Image (spheres, rainbow, N blue to C red):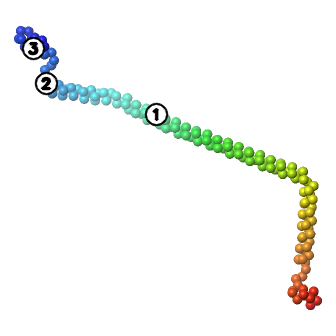
């Protein structure tokens, strides 16, 4: 509160409060204009940022799909390798079984030869008996009873 020259009334240094509505309306208009100007100025940058975000999102999606495919390929290759290993183990097991059988046959060849000979003799005798039986005439019950006299 300062004294004005000669009047004796105090003069305030702040603006008067009579025109507050006018000042706030002007301030609002100015602020709105500044916001519009700012949004117009930053709109291209905002669009570029959105596009960059979309590109980054697409790249992340592509990277994720690539990682999934790579993981699936690695898993498939591991499964194929395991199947190949199992095949090799099974084949080697069969080879060992065949070698064991061959060695047993070779070691017991005399007994095997005797068994085969006996089997062939039995087969020949049974076929001979069957052939003789097949070559006979069929006889009825009375003829068999009388020994073929009637």
Q: Is residue 64 above or below residue 41?
A: below
78 sits left or right of 136 in the view: left
Density class for disc 2 (Cα within 10 Å; few <14, some 14-19, many ≥20) is few
Mark 2 residue element? loop
Disc 1 is placed on an element classified as helix
- Give the quarter of the figure containing the C terminus: bottom right
Indicate whether 101 appears above or below 36: below
Q: Earlier in the sequence, mark 3 or mark 2?
A: 3
Q: Residue at x 84, y 51 (%)?
A: 101
Q: Position of residue 67 (x, y in %)?
A: 55, 37
Q: Nearer the viewer, mark 3 or mark 2?
A: 3
Q: CA distance from mark 2 to mark 1?
A: 53 Å
Residue closest to the far top? 6
Q: Which SS class for mark 3? A: strand
Task: Give the residue at the far right of this rendering.
Answer: 149
Relative to 41, 7 lies left or right: left
Q: Which residue is mark 2?
A: 19
| Mark sitting on residue 56 | 1
Total of numbered circles in the picture?
A: 3
Up/down of 97 relative to 29, above or below: below
Q: Earlier in the sequence, mark 3 or mark 1?
A: 3
Q: Nearer the viewer, mark 2 or mark 1?
A: 2
Residue drawn at (46%, 36%) of the image: 57
Coordinates of residue 71 in the picture (x, y in percent): 58, 39
Alpha carbon separation for disc pair 3 and 2: 20 Å
Q: Which mark is residue 10?
A: 3
Tell me which label, 2 or 1, sits earlier in the chain.
2
């Amino acid at each position: 509160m300062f004294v004005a020259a000669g009047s004796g009334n105090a003069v305030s240094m702040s603006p008067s409060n009579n025109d507050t509505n006018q000042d706030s309306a002007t301030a609002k208009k100015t602020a709105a204009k500044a916001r519009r100007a700012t949004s117009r100025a930053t709109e291209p940058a905002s669009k570029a940022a959105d596009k960059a975000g979309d590109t980054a999102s697409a790249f992340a999606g592509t990277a994720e799909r690539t990682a999934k495919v790579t993981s699936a390929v690695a898993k498939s290759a591991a499964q194929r390798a395991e199947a190949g290993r199992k095949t090799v183990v099974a084949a080697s097991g069969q080879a060992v079984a065949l070698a064991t059988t061959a060695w047993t046959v070779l070691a017991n060849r005399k007994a095997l030869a005797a068994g085969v000979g006996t089997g062939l003799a039995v087969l020949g005798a049974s076929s001979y008996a069957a052939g003789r039986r097949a070559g006979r005439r069929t006889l009825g019950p009375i003829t068999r009873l009388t020994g073929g006299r009637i």
